[in-house]
Amino acid sequence: MPLNVVLAGLLAVLASPSLVLGSTIRGLFDVPNTYPQIASCLAQPSFYSCENTTVIENTCCSPTPGGLVLSTQFWDTYTGYEHQGQILPKGSWTLHGLWPDNCDGSYAQYCDLTRQYDAQPSPATLPDGTVVPPYTGPSLDTFVLGFGRIDLLDYMNKYWVSQGQPNNVFWAHEFSKHATCTSTFDVACYGPGYKKHQDVVDFFQAATRAFKQYPTFDMLATFGIVPSNQTTYKLSQIQTALQSQVGALPYLGCGKNGTVLQEVWYFQHVVGTEQFGHFKTIDSTTKTSCSSTADIWYYERTPSSEREVRLLP
Ligand SMILES: *[C@@H]1O[C@H](CO)[C@@H](O)[C@H](O)[C@H]1NC(C)=O
Ligand SMILES: *[C@@H]1O[C@H](CO)[C@@H](O)[C@H](O)[C@H]1NC(C)=O
Ligand SMILES: *[C@@H]1O[C@H](CO)[C@@H](O)[C@H](O)[C@H]1NC(C)=O
């Protein structure tokens, strides 16, 4: 994010009428919050999600159902919103989301319409006929800034970059479609001290935390697999590179009949909450859409669609 945007965010926080300066500064530099209130989880059995059939009664303690957690990333070569400064991060794939699949691979979506912030619901009607009303309220940037998390918003603008829609619309989609079905972000888990949108900010934090575990670009590059518009790769090379670093086989998604690399999904089980728990990578339960025989393109990005983000602003 350009410095002027960071400063604008800081000023927005400082100008927030609900916060006096003292508490804002304290909020900015305090230790991270420790919500949801998980002390009661000590009384629950503890194991990796989807690995034990013992019922977890307190669903605030572990994602239930939805214990097959997917940390997903995109490889896009452009965003379509470059004119609005929405540029891809050089040397990195981008964050897609953190999804709560059920242990059998099925999944729920838009589970709490009181926390529906998606301006372009997809699907707009759920399988049971429920219509998901489009959100028209303020941008979710304001939720993050409301908690003083300029650092998180800056990271999201660098690495959680969407193609074909503004980033904040995409983030809202990911929260509303997926995080509302992840039990550890349920509002009830926050207890009486719940501050509005805390669950949203916590989800954004959790999704970025999971994303940082998987530096896909670097893992591929160490095997000599770098974006190229001249050279192609085989699926097995790409799989070997990633598997050797994460200990399990991720799902790889390809377009153009399996010949253009576009996506990776890392499958995980989690012990504890998505907010603070530990993720263990497991083999994909979904068959790759990349061709196992054809040459696969891992395209270079359009130069004007990417920027260096690893330096100071
Ligand atoms: C499942 O969890 C229960 C409760 O913690 C434990 O007693 C049991 O040994 C576990 N079963 C397996 C197969 O790990
Ligand atoms: C798509 O890939 C499959 C399997 O490699 C091949 O049989 C088929 O002809 C391809 N289709 C097109 C339209 O290229
Ligand atoms: C490489 O090819 C992709 C896909 O056609 C294109 O979007 C991109 O601009 C190309 N990059 C370079 C550096 O030529």
Image (tube, helix red, strand yellow):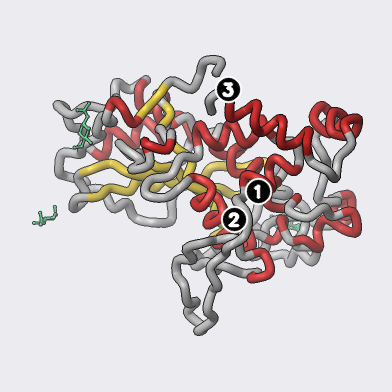
Question: Residue 193, how many percent across, how many down?
Answer: 89, 54
Q: Amino acid at mark 3?
A: Leu
Q: Residues within 10 Å of mark 2 (few under 14, many from 20)?
A: many
Determine contact: label 1, label 2, CB under 8 Å: yes
Q: Which residue is mark 1?
A: 203
Q: Is residue 256 above or below residue 16?
A: below
What residue is drawn where x is 16% and y is 44%? 293
Q: CA distance from mark 1 to mark 2?
A: 7 Å
The quadrant of the picture showing ligand 1 is bottom right
| Mark 1 or 2, nearer chain start | 2
**Residue 244 shows up from this direction:** no
Q: Which residue is mark 2?
A: 175
What residue is drawn where x is 25% and y is 34%? 298
Image quarter of residue 61? bottom right
User: Residue 128 versus residue 118: which sits nearer the camera?
Assistant: 118
Q: Residue furthest bottom?
A: 129
Question: Residue 86, how many percent across, how many down?
Answer: 43, 36
Badge 2 element: helix
Q: CA distance from mark 1 to mark 3?
A: 25 Å
Label 3 beta carbon less than 8 Å to ligand 3: no
